[in-house]
Amino acid sequence: MQPAEQRDEVEMLWLMLLIRRFEERASQQYQAQKIGGFCHLYIGQEAVVTGAIAAIRFDDYIITAYRDHAHALARGTSANACMAELFGKDTGCSRGLGGSMHFFDKEHHMYGGHAIVGAHVPLACGLAFACKYRNEDRVTLCFFGDGAINQGSFHEALNLAALFKLPVIFICENNLFAMGTSVERSTSLKQIVDRAEGYDIPGCVVDGMNFRHVRDTLSEVVESIRKDPHPAFVEARTYRYRGHSMSDPASYRTKDQLEKYRLDDPITRLRAQLTREGKLTNEKFDELDKEAKQIALESVKFAEQSDEPPLEKLYDYTYANSGVEAGVSPATKDSAADTAAATK
Amino acid sequence: MNMREITYRQALNEALTEELARDPNVFLMGEEVAEYKGAYKVSQGLLERFGPKRIIDTPISENGFAGLGVGAAMVGLRPIIEFMTFSFSFVAFDQVVNNAPNMLTMSGGQFNIPITFRGPNGPAHQLGATHSHATECLYANVPGLKVCTPATPRDAKGLLKTAVRDNNPVLVLESELLYSSKGMIEPAEMELLIPLGQAEIKREGSDVTIVCYAQTVALALAVAEKFEDEDISAEVLDLRSIKPLDERAIYDSVAKTHRVVIVEQDRPFCGVGAEVCYRIQKNIFDELDAPIGRVSQEDVPMPYNERLEKAVLPNEEKLIAAVKKVCYA
């Protein structure tokens, strides 16, 4: 898959379709008990991650919470590797050891997949800290839900990011519910973006159902951060069509609310925009959708046919090779001057 | 080789200085580590030498900066995160037990976390219940973490340097009561790396093995000396690392003395001593001439009152009684 910056809107529409068709297959396979544990679907929120990815370079970092399938797919992790991970297979993006909530893909700069709500927000600061430390102009995108913004780790991370002027964009995917608790029942603020103000971090709100709005807003933010490292906060207002996880019938919300958002579907909207502008025909759309469905279907076959992680490797991933040769030896030359130069 | 005498504090400072000088990916972060020079002055002179980019003061925000360290380690930096005391590490518990050690497995081997968490651990003097935790048993319980507990300046330097170079999360549990203690160490121009998972016999003996670590090493040595008058020759085995645990050294010593007392600085229930005890009886039961003895803290929150605090901690009286019991003396 090409780096995001080279992809045009039709390709990004295709990416949204791929995410949706993949998730639909995952849902089906979960019900067929091929997938274990928890499984949180992203259906309805596709414009947020695709819009954000379209605004960054391939070498930028992204990190997210447990609703992470789409983020890996958007980064370029293959549907095969994603589905195989859900199946707990050795060919999965985390070798079947992470599962739905812990997708990782180093090659595509996808730093997880983190399942303790809010706990990865400080990690995002660390990724951004490393970029600044090395004088790189990468930005880090840190995705999380509206449920994360009341965790201590979130607040500590925002304060550190502001204090250290870290090049990180905090993207709150506000889908109105932290599991079954609505934002009004969890958060003292009228709007989530105001959290940023408390840390002197510039914030803005985007329509998370509108690919172009997400991409264009994020592009501006990214550009400003590359020039001069600093954190930013984006509240993306979006909606998940499914429950919190597969076991959630979502009885805490009304059918009317769901229908209202379905009418505002991010895929339908981008399709309409492109069609209106003569950039997309119905035939082309059907072709893209067919391809996405085919890839999703094949990923299930791939996952089914893949091997499980070998039992004899159970202990292989607990510790990395220490890399230390212990003992007493003459000291290495003091290279403080080189060190200072290297980190300037 | 001209050995020299330095303090535990100086030894840690040397280790930090050498590793910061050696590897530009190493940085030190924590509360008061830079301008204040460390709450216990361990990082004296580092800010002047390495600058604010690498010696970084943080707000009181343990979860935040511990997590920042883990994130930075994901992309190859080698953070040294100082907790002002490990009693405060509980505020960052999720980062230390969930994010740092799980990442390698959860990512299918893609992300190792080369991070060092260090700072004083264990009871100090009249700090009360919240500031007196001995955390080694909690952290050693977590797969993916390594835990070491240096008792001497030499071990402090050698273990900290090794920890910084290790590609895994390592906890270096220092001790507030040991910072000013002195000990002999190789000359500054020698590079000293003590492997994790290697215990050391701090005193040879033939009648009983006293297994100890961290603050209890000095206690064990003092008691061993007292037993000389009673013709009981005690061997003092300093574990130095809790995880990995040097089982070989324990078994070798027990096979020689056939009697063991474990003196730990943590609490008895699910403590380090319980694990060591299990392994000894499981693996060399036939070598034992007496049931294994154990001296721990009392199983209560640490009282502030000095007399009561002393009663909670392992002390000479308790250790002497335990040694006598296993020696049927």
Image (spheres, rainbow, N blue to C red):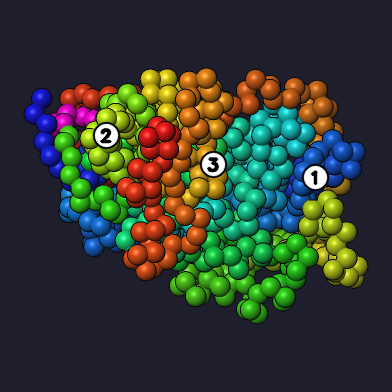
Residue A118 is situated, as x and y percent measured from the top left of the image, at 59, 58
Indicate the amino acid at tag 2: Glu
Magenta-colored span: B186-194
Q: At 47% from the left edge and 25% from the top edge, which residue is drawn? A: B289
Three-letter residue code for mark 1: Glu
Mark yes or no: residue B97 visible: no
Q: CA distance from mark 3 to mark 2?
A: 38 Å
**Inter-mark Cα distance, 3 to 1:** 37 Å
B288 shown above or below B124: above
Look at mark 3 in the image and give the residue it sits on: B141
**How far apart in space, not on screen, are marks 1 and 2 (Cα)?**
75 Å
What residue would you read off at disc 1?
A23
Q: Nearer the viewer, residue B267 or A176?
A: B267
Residue lying at 27% horizontally and 34% vertically, measured from the top left: B230
Name which residue lies at 37% across and 30% down. Answer: B209
Tell me the SS state at disc 1.
helix
Residue nearest the observer in this picture, A210 or A244: A244
- Residue A305 location, x and y as percent? 80, 23
Single out the mark in the foreground, 3 or 2: 2
Is residue A101 highlighted in magenta?
A: no
Please identify, in this view, whether the residue under mark 1 or under mark 2 is nearer the observer: 2
Indicate the quadrant where residue A181 lies: bottom right
Residue highlighted by disc 2: B230
Specify few, some or many for label 3: CA neighbours under 10 Å numbering under 14, 14-19, or 20 or more.
some
